[in-house]
Image (tube, rainbow, N blue to C red):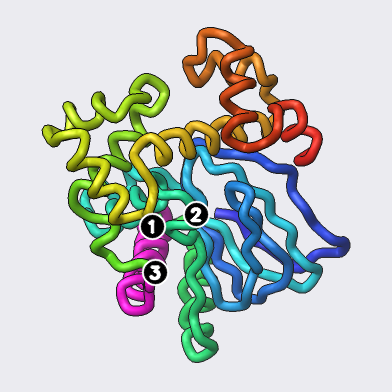
């Protein structure tokens, strides 16, 4: 757990990614948080969830404050509700499943109490401090789950059933499975049925969703200093020229042009 104290000068991290989850609790807002190339305002009484693999950059203003919880999915393998919420954040992109939760001013004191109690335990010598901090984090995530259920315009139905199964499978296998027929076979449906279902849920074909995810991962790698050649091999393109052509076709930019824009 990390405290986000007031700053003496403007703060901006470099774009980076982690192998663990982060839960940002912003008690006082100010600044922006870029997650997977989408900019979100840092608002008072808000929570931002960043998942493993996402590239993010925090640009806090001087008087912004809060805390960050660092954790793994395994911490919630006994709570399927939270596990599902976190996995949805992992499998869907930030335009489909926003990383931000905004709470009203009346709830601000509750957010402050929960996070400051967790911070107090984090700095104690109690043998139970890790469990108590986890309990406080669990409570925050349950409030996020409740808020999403009560205010989300995305609709929970969009993230259930075949579409959800497809997105989860693609998240795990996109480097090796790039054809619609491969996903349809594993999900035990026809290609047409899978395409129709995905089109209904997100307005894109299966191929378009797969390509969009490959490009997102390519952008993440390029934005964190990996060369275009290494990115191509990482994403199972046997020829670097093939990867560069694919990237430009999908984005309008060559990998090097993209790197220059985002340096």
Q: Quadrant of residue 128?
A: bottom left
Front residue of 102/192: it is: 192
In this rendering, which labeled residue sits more in front, label 2 or label 1? 2
Q: Earlier in the sequence, mark 1 or mark 3?
A: 1
User: What's the residue at 70%, 28% (across, down)?
Assistant: 254
User: What's the residue at 27%, 65% (across, down)?
Assistant: 156
Q: Main secondary structure of the magenta part?
A: helix
Q: Residues within 10 Å of mark 3 (few under 14, many from 20)?
A: many
**Label at residue 94:** 2
Residue 239 in view:
yes
Which residue is the site of mark 1?
134
Q: Which residues are magenta?
A: 128-153
| Location of residue 183 in the rendering, given as x and y in whole percent from the top left corner | 25, 30
Quadrant showing the N terminus: bottom right
CA distance for labels 1 and 3: 15 Å
**Label at residue 100:** none
In this rendering, which labeled residue sits more in front, label 3 or label 2? 2
CA distance for labels 3 and 2: 16 Å
Which residue is the site of mark 3?
144
| Location of residue 111 in the rendering, given as x and y in whole percent from the top left corner | 49, 77
User: What's the residue at 47%, 47% (across, down)?
Assistant: 51
């Amino acid at each position: 757990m990390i405290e986000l104290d007031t700053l003496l000068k403007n703060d901006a991290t470099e774009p980076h990614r982690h192998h663990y989850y982060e839960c940002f609790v912003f008690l006082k807002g100010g600044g922006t948080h870029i997650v997977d190339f989408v900019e979100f305002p840092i608002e008072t009484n808000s929570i931002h969830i960043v998942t493993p693999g996402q590239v993010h950059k925090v640009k806090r203003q001087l008087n912004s404050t809060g805390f960050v919880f660092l954790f793994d999915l395994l911490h919630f393998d006994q709570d399927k509700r939270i596990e599902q919420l976190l996995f949805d954040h992992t499998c869907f992109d930030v335009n489909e499943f926003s990383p931000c939760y905004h709470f009203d001013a009346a709830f601000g004191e509750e957010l402050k109490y929960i996070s400051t109690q967790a911070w107090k335990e984090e700095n104690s010598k109690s043998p139970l401090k890790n469990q108590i901090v986890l309990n406080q984090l669990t409570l925050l995530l349950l409030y996020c789950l409740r808020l999403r259920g009560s205010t989300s315009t995305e609709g929970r139905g969009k993230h259930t059933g075949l579409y959800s199964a497809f997105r989860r499978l693609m998240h795990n296998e996109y480097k090796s499975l790039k054809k619609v027929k491969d996903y349809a076979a594993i999900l035990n449906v026809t290609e047409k049925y899978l395409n129709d279902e995905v089109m209904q849920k997100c307005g894109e074909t299966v191929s378009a969703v797969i390509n969009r995810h490959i490009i997102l991962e390519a952008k993440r790698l390029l934005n964190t200093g990996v060369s275009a050649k290494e990115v191509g091999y990482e994403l199972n393109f046997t020829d670097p020229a093939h990867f560069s052509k694919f990237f430009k076709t999908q984005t309008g930019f060559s990998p090097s042009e993209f790197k220059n824009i985002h340096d």
